[in-house]
Amino acid sequence: MAKEAVLASVPKDWEVCTLSEKYTISAAGDLDPSDFSKRKTSLYKYPIYSNALQDGGIYGYCSKPRYAGNAITITGRGDIGHCVYRQEKFSAIVRLLVCEPKEPICSSYIAAYLENTAPFVFESTGVPQLTVPQIQDTPIPIPPLCEQERIAKVLEDTEALTVSMETLIAKKKAIMQGVVEQLLSGRLRLNGYSDPWGKAALGEIGTMYAGGTPPSDVAEYYAGDIPWVSISDMSAGNKYIETTQNFLSQKGIENSPAKIYPAGTLLFAMYASIGKCCIARGQVSSSQAVLGIYDLKNYSIEFLYYVLSSKTRIFQQMGQTGTQSNLSKDIMMGFVVPVPGREEQEAIAAVLSDMDREIEALTRKLAKHRLIQQGMLQQLLTGRIRLL
């Protein structure tokens, strides 16, 4: 975006400058091995940043930082154009671009603008990279310093809430994983249950059928209202399958190995996302990559969902090596699962379902928060909302 275009889109009392007018921009050099530690110590306490995004880009630590705080780093290699505000003193290596302010300015605000708005153009020949000449003329809108700081504070608080919600969800998932392992192994029993558990092969407790795919060049086979579950539908879904990308007609069912599964069928991915499980809310069909398990004999479909979902790593290891890893109906028929009493199965499934619903509610809340955050960010960084 040209400087004039940015100027025309921001408030009259905002200044528009190029990045190099407000910052000294340089590319980091090689690592100094004489002043380096992989771990933070009382001597080596200042971070060294690289172009990596993992762990905040920290490569190691030094005792003599090259750059002062209130600066910005921009990744010039790898994941190009990622901008981060660096509050404290630091050093940098390997083509990481560093922007040091020439005058009082809120670099947290500028980093947010660059990260979310600036359209960096990078070299496409050889190894893609950003260079100092490519970013130095990037136009940036500059509100009065007090407004920069207010905007930065709002964005910082909003991001802190996002991180807090992400941390809470990760904690809830970790707790649930522990509960799953304890309850489904029988090491932890719910109050009132003490009868010994049995074991059975999947083929002994239910009917199993792998779906099919009608010829894709016959349009009328796909012009119906029968949901046709594919691996991509399952990968994008959660516990329950509500809808699908494609639908079959009755003719499609009749002219392919596909069949209609009853509502409540457990769908199991045998290819690609091996071990992924979903429960069909209504009647569905599926591709041959999906195994339908239904008509269970004294076995809870909800309990089976958690049993199979907890074994994903085992299923992936069981996958046959060919053009792609996969399982088969025959393999799954012999897979052994625990068999508590039916009442205990349902009690365990109820506990895990409650935990699932809590995590899903938090995840939806986080997604909504992120949408609001993104909208607010765009409004603040363009001056359409003012913090005067």
Image: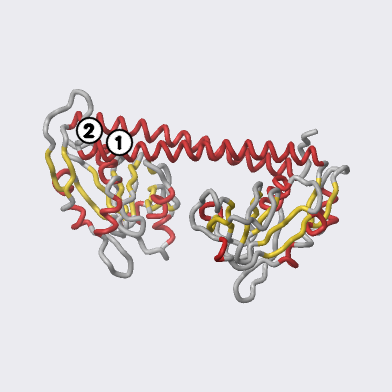
Q: Secondary structure at mark 2?
A: loop
> Which residue, as the protein is rendered here, is positioned at the far right?
12
Please tell me which residue is depicted at 25% across the width and 64% down the height of the picture: 320
Is 177 left or right of 94, judged from the image as shown? left
Is 179 left or right of 47, judged from the image as shown? left
Residue 27, picture quadrant = bottom right
Of residue 35 and residue 285, the one placed in the foreground of this image is: 35
Q: Are marks 2 and 1 in contact (CB under 8 Å)?
A: yes
Q: Position of residue 314 (x, y in %)?
A: 26, 53
Residue 384, picture quadrant = top right
Q: Position of residue 278 (x, y in %)?
A: 34, 45
Of residue 118 and residue 49, the one placed in the foreground of this image is: 49
* Amino acid residing under circle 2: Leu
- Return the residue at label 2: 188
* Quadrant (top left/top right/bottom left/bottom right) for the N terminus: bottom right
* Amino acid residing under circle 1: Val
- Return the residue at label 1: 179
Q: Position of residue 305 (x, y in %)?
A: 28, 42
Please tell me which residue is depicted at 27% across the width and 48% down the height of the picture: 311
Residue 46 position (above or below residue 11): below
Please tell me which residue is depicted at 51% across the width and 58% down the height of the picture: 37
